[in-house]
Image (spheres, helix red, strand yellow):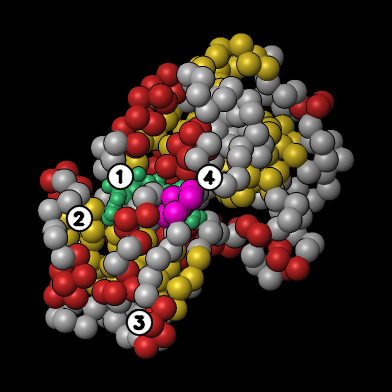
Amino acid sequence: MSPNIPKTQTAAIVTSSDAPLEVRTDHPVVQPSELKPGECLVHILSTGVCHTDLHARKNDWPLSPKTPLIGGHEGVGEVVAIAEGTPNAPIKIGQRVGIKWLAYSCLDCEQCRNGLEQSCPNQKLSGFTVDGTFAQYVVSYVHHVTPIPDELPSDAAASILCAGVTVYRALKYSGARAGQWVVLPGAGGGLGHLAIQYAANMGLRVIAIDTGAEKKKLVESLGAEKWIDFKETTDIVKAVQDATGGLGPHVAVVTSASATGYQQAVDYLRHGGTLMAVGLPGHAKLESSIFWTVLKSITIRGSYVGNRQDAVEALELAAQGKVKVVFAVKQLSELSDIYEDLDAGKIAGRIVVNMPK
Ligand code: NAD
Ligand code: ZN
């Protein structure tokens, strides 16, 4: 038996990039009888606010989101219905699951078979091409929601589903080995503060780049060995190289939402180093010296969220208490102010919204 499902709900809706965000209390809830095979209905308890939600809200990428749009893709909630005609659903009613950016992929194409589910041509993206988690009830997909380990409270798990998964995968594919240096431009933000912790768990030594006293305190408390304030440092390349004793870091995982975080990476990386591109400024070009990229045998690699297995692994480390999201709790009615603070670079760690019951 499904629990009682209301006909209407509270949801934050973007009607266009220049109209104010609307938090409505009368948004219709998709009823269990309306679900299509393979879909489930999730009652959201907590959801993180990612800088990607702000890009979608501002429509500042080469790809545009659907409108009207309910954003959000770091949601944790309880399964309240599974569509009829869904054989072998790997989840049960009442189970806590996570909704991530990649809401759906076909699992049958070449990209999915290779584990690159996030590049599936039939993909659905939560809070971008389908409605996301800034609502009390969300339609999702039984094969793509991620079970939440019992040890993890919902608000503590939420931001692992995007920020955590993304930096976990970027580090996993960076080739970095224990004892090596990784530099993290954007270290004080949502993705960056989790990258410090996943890196520390891999035995890496961390140089954090960001700005301001609050972010300095945060990154140092999480295990960053060196701190560079990008607004106060005139020669970033020298500062990064000096921090490693002269040769430069082995890996850079860039999570700043602006192009500036990328600018010096090829210059400060060690010979043989790898630049993992993660932050998503919409219209910037990655400018680096071709000559030095070749002579230093630099690898430049894009890294886009993660697949289902990356999500399970990233959550497992959080469940063991080895990685903790540092977050402040806010209400859905405050979403516009949260976006303003994100835009101004004022948020150290993450904001998590606890949904109205
Ligand atoms: P955030 O705003 O919480 O963090 C970004 C941080 O970068 C801030 O702390 C800011 O002060 C810092 N910063 C800005 N300019 C900098 C510079 N020049 N040098 C060093 N630090 C700088 O944002 P977030 O939620 O962590 O997201 C960051 C970016 O990653 C966004 O563009 C987002 O869309 C993108 N993202 C990418 C993926 C992916 O799959 N690749 C997944 C999630 C988010
Ligand atoms: Zn995200």
**Quick check: can you spot residue 75?**
no
Q: CA distance from mark 2 to mark 1?
A: 17 Å
**Start-end of magenta stretch:** 279-284
Q: Amino acid at mark 2?
A: Phe
Q: Which is the main secondary structure of the residues drawn in magenta?
A: loop
Q: Quadrant of residue 323?
A: bottom left
Q: Earlier in the sequence, mark 2 or mark 4?
A: 4
* In-image side of 134 versus 348 (left or right): right
Q: Earlier in the sequence, mark 4 or mark 3?
A: 4
Disc 2 on helix, strand or loop? loop
Residue mark closest to the camera, 1 vs 4: 4
Between residue 66 and residue 223, name the one nearer to us. Answer: 66
Residue drawn at (68%, 21%) of the image: 29
Disc 1 on helix, strand or loop? loop
Q: Which residue is mark 2?
A: 230
Q: Which residue is mark 4?
A: 61
Instruction: Please determine whether, in this image, residue 12 is positioned above or below residue 167.
Output: above
Disc 1 Cβ-to-ligand 1 distance below 8 Å = yes
Disc 3 on helix, strand or loop? helix
Disc 4 on helix, strand or loop? loop
Residue drawn at (17%, 51%) of the image: 231
Q: Amino acid at mark 3?
A: Trp
Q: Amino acid at mark 1?
A: Gly
Instruction: Please determine whether, in this image, residue 71 is positioned above or below residue 106.
Output: above
Between residue 169 and residue 186, name the one nearer to us. Answer: 186
Marks 1 and 4 in Cβ contact (< 8 Å): no
Q: Quadrant of residue 107?
A: bottom right
* In-image side of 75 versus 209 (left or right): right
Q: Which residue is mark 1?
A: 349
Q: CA distance from mark 4 to mark 3?
A: 29 Å
